[in-house]
Every structure is written in structure tokens, then in C-alpha cells.
Image (cartoon, rainbow, N blue to C red):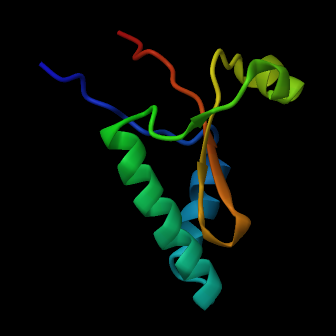
């Protein structure tokens, strides 16, 4: 049985900013589509990106969000999606 994968934004504000791209100018709408496609890929395979070496993790991420892994997905126009994989809380 496959585990269900949930994608969540680290803050409510970040999710709202992402959603606002959908109704923004053309470039914002394009970025929304790129991110949305990337999120679909991450839902299918959370390790689909490039694993970022621990020595390159921002200290703020470790301290504030307690990350134990960090991944990167390259988007068009030099954008990138950064995420961490957390076990599901029961």
C-alpha cells in the first residue's frame, strides 16, 4: 500500500502568496503554473528533486523549521522550489 503524500506550506502567509499568483499579472500566473506542476511532481515522488547537502542548509531553516533534509526543484526562469520531507504526525 502506498503512503498518501500531503504537501503543506510552511506558513499560511506563504500559501496565500502562492494562491495570489493565480490572479496576478501574466508572469505571476506563469509562475503559479510552474509551481503547481512542481507540486504535482513532489506529490508523486517527494525525492524527485536534488537533495541539498547539509552544509548548504540555511541555519535559519534548521533553527526555525527543524529541517532534517532539504530538497530543490528547478523551475523555469531561475526560480526554484525548496522543500523538506517530514513524517506524518499520527
Please tell me whether residue 12 is drawn above or below residue 50 in the rendered image.
below
Where residue 49 appears, as percent x and y from the top left, is 53, 41
* Residue 73: image location, x then y, percent: 57, 48
The residue under the point 68% across, 72% down is: 77
Name the residue: 25% across, 28% down: 4
Q: Is 76 or 60 nearer to us in this picture? A: 76
Residue lying furthest top? 90
Q: Residue at x 71, y 23 (%)?
A: 65
**Looking at the image, which residue sits at the far left?**
1
Q: Position of residue 57 (x, y in %)?
A: 80, 27
Residue furthest right in the image: 59
**Quadrant holding the N terminus:** top left
- Location of residue 53 (image quadrant): top right
Q: Nearer the viewer, residue 90 or 31?
A: 31
Image quadrant where one finds the C terminus: top left
- Depth check, front residue: 23 or 78: 78
So how many labels did they put on this image?
Answer: 0
x, y percentage for residue 70?
65, 28
Q: Is residue 39 above or below residue 20?
A: above
In the image, residue 49 above or below residue 29: above
Which residue is at the front of the view, 20 or 31? Answer: 31
Amino acid at each position: 500500500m502506498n503512503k498518501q503524500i500531503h504537501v503543506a506550506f510552511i506558513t499560511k502567509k506563504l500559501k496565500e502568496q502562492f494562491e495570489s499568483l493565480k490572479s496576478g499579472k501574466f508572469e505571476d500566473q506563469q509562475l503559479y503554473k510552474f509551481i503547481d506542476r512542481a507540486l504535482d511532481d513532489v506529490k508523486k515522488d517527494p525525492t524527485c528533486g536534488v537533495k541539498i547537502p547539509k552544509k548548504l542548509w540555511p541555519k535559519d531553516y534548521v533553527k526555525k523549521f527543524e529541517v532534517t533534509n532539504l530538497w530543490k526543484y528547478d523551475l523555469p526562469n531561475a526560480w526554484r522550489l525548496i522543500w523538506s520531507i517530514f513524517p506524518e504526525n499520527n
